[in-house]
Amino acid sequence: MMKDANLDFFIGTTFDTVRYITDCRYVPIIDYFIDLYATILPAQGTPTLFAPWIEGEAMGYSRTPPPSYVASPVVAEKWASLFTEALKKYNFMSGRIGFDYFPYSLYEALKNKLPQATLIPTMSELLKTRALKTPDEIGLLKKAAKILDDGIKAGKRSIKSGNREYHIMAKMESAMMAGGAESLPWLNFRSGNRTLKSIFSNGRKLRKGDAVVFDIGVMSEGYYGDAARTYVAGSPHKDLHDLYDALYDSYSEGVAKIKPGVKGSEIDKEIRNGLLERGYPDYPTPSGHGIGMRVTEFPWIGRREEAGNFDEELKPAMVICLEPRTYKKNVAAVGVEDVILVTETGHELLTRAPRDLN
């Protein structure tokens, strides 16, 4: 990416970019997204890392820490000074610097300190490059998917009338941590009529016939897994059964289209048309997304008019998630999601936990 963009240096400030370049494991707190970690990568040479903690350092503390523990726009001048000092050590004062994500205040401060340099936003180019996974990355994504399956199966076993949402979530989280999860970034869980109006759990007790819908995430060695399932406590009544069948059949038709050369919008359209033809509404969100060191990467699996120039053809070694959903008033909202690898001839489902209602 740096060669194609003719960059002399690249500055990364998001957690995934920093880890991708330096292998620095971060503390998964949302405040730290662009506020505590950064790296400078020269076109030739080794990167400079700014981080509060680094594995292998004394007590974990870095010798090149960030300027403070507050939002980066507040201390933009300090960050700009750190970057400028590091670039001077590389004997750089003018040329092309790419970056992934700068607050405006930091962008202005760095421009003032390096007036002869050209700052170039390159997030889209970076994500396009990372959309094609290496064999090692595919192995790590398969590992994350296996951990997801462990969590889903543990949750499915616990879905019984009388059990509370929190208790089922605890079983899922325990199984994923035991399976090797590095962190559990989210677990959205709801049941009964709450599936129609919330994504969050509240400790509700399950009742016989309740739909149970959850969307769970996991991180393992820097790579994400993301999956969703719909199950039922006991046996589904006809309206729920028909609703889920419509979703699952439409979803399966979308999955069947996954192969090299197909655009994301074609898969999106297949699923939406399937739902509408079966008499159920579609959804306001895209049908899916790429996944890797970010939860949402390229390719974009959405409407053609929304994806625009990012509506790209699938290629072997891309890894995506499909996550359609639908609902019926006074019945439930249902969803399903899997991690899927694009292969040379088609696709491979990496998450394999049961998708049947009960």
Image: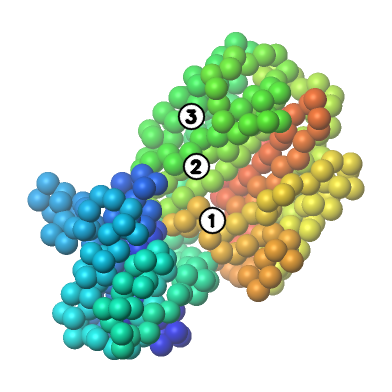
Q: Is residue 220 left or right of residue 238?
A: left
**Looking at the image, is 182 positioned above or below residue 212?**
below
- Binning the other alpha carbons within 10 Å of mark 3 as few (below 14), some (14 to 19) or many (20 upward) gives many
Rendered location of residue 96, percent (x, y): 36, 85
Question: Which residue is pictured at 58% across the width and 38% down the height?
Answer: 215
Instruction: Please tell me which of labels 3 and 1 falls first in the chain.
Output: 3
The amino acid marked with disc number 2 is Gly
- Gap between marks 3 and 1 measured at Cα: 23 Å
- Gap between marks 2 and 3 measured at Cα: 11 Å
Provide the residue designation for mark 3. 172
State which quarter of the image contains the C terminus.
top right
Instruction: Please tell me which of labels 2 and 3 falls first in the chain.
Output: 3
Rendered location of residue 195, percent (x, y): 68, 29
The amino acid marked with disc number 3 is Met
Q: Give SS at disc 3.
A: helix
- Binning the other alpha carbons within 10 Å of mark 2 as few (below 14), some (14 to 19) or many (20 upward) gives many
Labelled pair 3, 1 in contact (Cβ < 8 Å): no
